[in-house]
Each structure stands twice: as structure tokens, then as C-alpha cells.
Image (tube, rainbow, N blue to C red):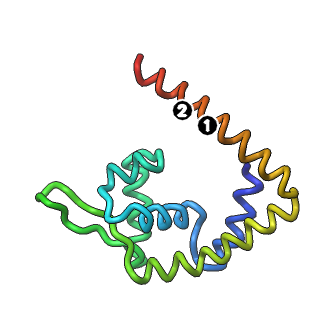
Amino acid sequence: MRRVTQHYDVEMRKVGLKTTQYSLLSHVEKLGPVRPIDLAASIKMEPSTLTRNLKLLVASGWVTVLAGVDARSRHVVITEAGRAKRAEAKRHWRRAQNGINELLGMGNVAALHALIDQSMNKLNALSDEDDEV
């Protein structure tokens, strides 16, 4: 998994992003406006980690955090600059994806995805059991 991530990181660096930043930007675009707590739950990230990662996107002008319906609530929203950055990065993400598909072969990639999905389902069930204890 580390080698695959490194392959994607090379492409994302070309547009000034890390893979985690691209993923977060994509989720904000898809879900936004979204409360930080809901965003963290959706991507299975600790709220404190999300806050740290969002700071970089806010500082770059790619997302903004707006006031919610009351003084305590906030909503994360992608900006126009963020949409443009994500669109630029998406082309590089696809290039990385195509490179992996070509290198490993579509059958192997599909098998890896199936194995990862099965494993995540089992790990999520284990996590649910741990939460009950």
C-alpha cells in the first residue's frame, strides 16, 4: 500500500497537494457545506486530525469554514479556488490511477479492490464490537 501511495503522491506533488489533501478536498466538495464532525465521521478521521488537515486547505484558500446556525456550529465549504485545484489535481489522480492499472493489470487491480473492501468490512465490524465494550 505504501508504494501505491507513493505513486499517487508523485502525481499530487505536481499540483502542490498531498494525497490526503486531495482526498479531503474531494470529500468537502462532495459533502459540503458540511459540519466538521460529520466530515470527520464520513472519512473516518479523528476530529483533531481533521482540524489540522483543514487548516492547510483554509490557509491555501481552497476551503473556508463558515458560521453555522448558532454560535457553536461551523460548516466547511469548498471555494472556487478549491474547485479549480481539485479539477487540476483530478487529472493527475487519473494519471496515477492509469499508471497503476497499466502496471498491475486491471484484473489484479479489481482483485485488490475486492480484497481491500472485504478486509475493511471485517475491520469495521471489529471496530463496532470494540465500541460496544
Crowd around label 2: few <14 · some 14–19 · many ≥20 (10 Å)? few
Give the CA distance from mark 2 to mark 1. Answer: 6 Å
User: Which residue, given by chain and number where applicable, does mark 2 sit on?
Assistant: 124
Mark 2 touches mark 1? (CB < 8 Å): yes
Residue 67: where, in percent of width, then height? 19, 65
Left or right of 120? Residue 41 is left
Q: Quadrant of the C terminus?
A: top left
- Quarter of the rendering containing residue 111: top right
- Quarter of the rendering containing residue 80: bottom left
Q: Secondary structure at mark 2?
A: helix
Crowd around label 1: few <14 · some 14–19 · many ≥20 (10 Å)? few
Image: 121 above or below 131: below
Q: How many numbered badges does the structure rendering display?
A: 2
Circle 1: residue type: Met
Q: Residue at x 43, y 49 (%)?
A: 42
Residue 35: where, in percent of width, then height? 29, 56
Circle 2: residue type: Asn
Image: 66 above or below 122: below
User: Which residue, given by chain and number where applicable, does mark 1 sit on?
Assistant: 120
- In this rendered view, identify the residue nearer to me: 57 or 133: 133
Q: Residue at x 49, y 83 (%)?
A: 84
Q: Which mark is residue 31?
A: none
Q: Residue furthest top?
A: 133
Q: Residue at x 51, y 79 (%)?
A: 85
Residue 16: where, in percent of width, then height? 58, 77
Left or right of 56? Residue 97 is right
